[in-house]
Image (cartoon, rainbow, N blue to C red):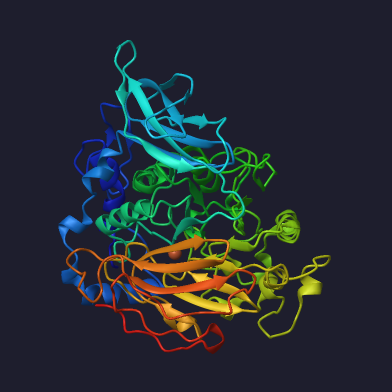
Amino acid sequence: MMRWCVLVLIGVGLASQAAGESPRGRGSDADGLTVVPLAVGQEADPPQGDERRAQRTEKQRRPKGDAAERAIPPDVAALGRLSWVLGRPTDRSVTVSVLFAGGLEGYCEYGIASGDYTRKTGMVSFSPGKPVVLVLDQLSSDKQCFYRLRYRKPGEGAFVEGAEHSFHTQRAPGSTFTFVIQGDSHPERPQMFAPSLYAQMLRAAATDRPDFYVTIGDDFSVDKLRTINADAVRQIYLNQRYFLSLVGRSAPLLLVNGNHEQAALCNLDGTPNNVAVWAQNARNTLFPQPVPDGFYTGDAKPVEHIGLLRDYYAWTWGDALFIVIDPYWHSPKPVDNVLGERKKTRDMWAVTLGDDQYWWFKQTLEQSQAKYKFVFAHHVLGTGRGGIEQADLFEWGGKNKKDVNAFAQKRPGWELPIHQLMAASGVSIFFQGHDHTFVRQQLDGVVYQTLPLPADPYYAFYNKDAYRTGDAFPGSGRVRVTVSPQEVRVEYVRSYLPKDATPEHPNGEIAFAYELPAGTKAKAQHPARGDGATGARPTPTISEVTTERPAPTT
Ligand SMILES: [Fe+2]
């Protein structure tokens, strides 16, 4: 059996280096951050399907990996002592989650001019390893705001002043702004993830100055853990938080649930001791996520041992409506992989958003007058492979595997399947992950945008056979979206390790780009334009989609 111990070593390596220990250390460091020995003696199941293909690819390209690329970058490791991330941006506030490894006290000061902090939060105590939430409020809408932390050891007089960062409150209609999305990061899979490349991509994303940063799921996989308990699950969220802090200090993080999180209804057992409760509580403790209030709408139904899930939610920003949806917390059966088993759910009608989410989704779409509407989910139906290839199936499109429309029978009372609802209500782009490659497709005026891996050091071309049409590209990187009153511009910004970048394919090249003019829903396209790169190829209009694909970068 192929052993994948190195894979979990990466996970523990981050926590251990952050705590100043060797990668195999265990216990607590002097500042109190618990280091969970995930790596010791663990081995994972052999990879399946696309993972097995990736493994072969990895073997072929083995010389590309080296110790430096596998090491946790020093700036990420340092975040183990102090990290903070933003979340829940509104028209007048943002929420900061601060986590110190040592016992300190402090506060945030903030204002709308750099270096001129006219407001401050109250003084709070930071207990080792326990995140503290600070709300920077009473701000004006549509403003760039600046903030910094001030902290000290209890009883000491002088404060340490942290570096200044900025964020933006809700944009007014007619504004131009940028947001960035990453696909499945999979830090537990060395065949898909290099820490140095991930950190490099996140630092670059911060320079895009996005108003927020969206992750599409499979960023907190618990599947590779041999022993699953609250501490081990929380450590996975901590490890990811250190990385995401690189961009999350200045761009609020908005998370989408994935299948490998195992934060799912089917895993509940009526007690607080199950993976779904551990995962969702770790997520909600370490990442401030939206709850229904005067700014956001979303999941208002508390779950025992968790409270509000914060798994589906919507908000408006500038001329755009943003909606995050989640099937995992609302399907009575496992949506994709069953934790600890290889079987999968056979009855795909058991995969559902559920009544509450469906009617909220429908109402949110239909009541919005936004010029652009963006929907985010881990994948069509939360499982399967492909984009529009899956869009006519089950709850998403109404048909069963025999091409018979069974929607009225299977979803009595529902008006339209998910895809038809999105098309009818003018959704501009549906963003999904799961397939680990960049693909742009369109169906009935809705763009289906599949996201690439952010930090695959082998730049592989995953699951390309699952896509029969569209513009597909291999490799690693982020998707940057610029929203303006005239159009939405979507760019695939590729990332290359320094030794892999070339004059023809530099780090940061725009591998592909397209624009959606306001009110036309994905009709006009244009050739991609690189930042001096020549890797882009002419692109037909999306109605002339091509199956021609560029060769994978080696
Ligand atoms: Fe994934």
Please tell me in which quarter of the rendered image ligand 1 is found. bottom left
Task: Examine the rendered structure and indicate whether residue 363 appears above or below residue 392.
Answer: above
Q: Position of residue 510 (x, y in %)?
A: 36, 70
Task: Examine the rendered structure and indicate whether residue 440 appears above or below residue 44.
Answer: below
Task: Examine the rendered structure and indicate whether residue 520 appears above or below residue 282.
Answer: below
Q: Position of residue 521 (x, y in %)?
A: 62, 73
Task: Work out whether residue 36 or residue 132 is closer to the camera in this orientation and state it.
Answer: 132
Task: Work out whether residue 48 or residue 463 is closer to the camera in this orientation and state it.
Answer: 463
Quadrant in which the C terminus appears: bottom left
Residue, x 22% and y 56% (percent of image)?
A: 70
The image quarter in which residue 48 lies: bottom left
Residue, x 31% and y 80% (percent of image)?
A: 552
Task: Examine the rendered structure and indicate whether residue 46 appears above or below residue 30.
Answer: below
Q: Is residue 287 visible?
A: no
Left or right: residue 196 compared with residue 100 = left
Task: Work out whether residue 97 or residue 1 is closer to the camera in this orientation and state it.
Answer: 97
The image quarter in which residue 476 lies: bottom left
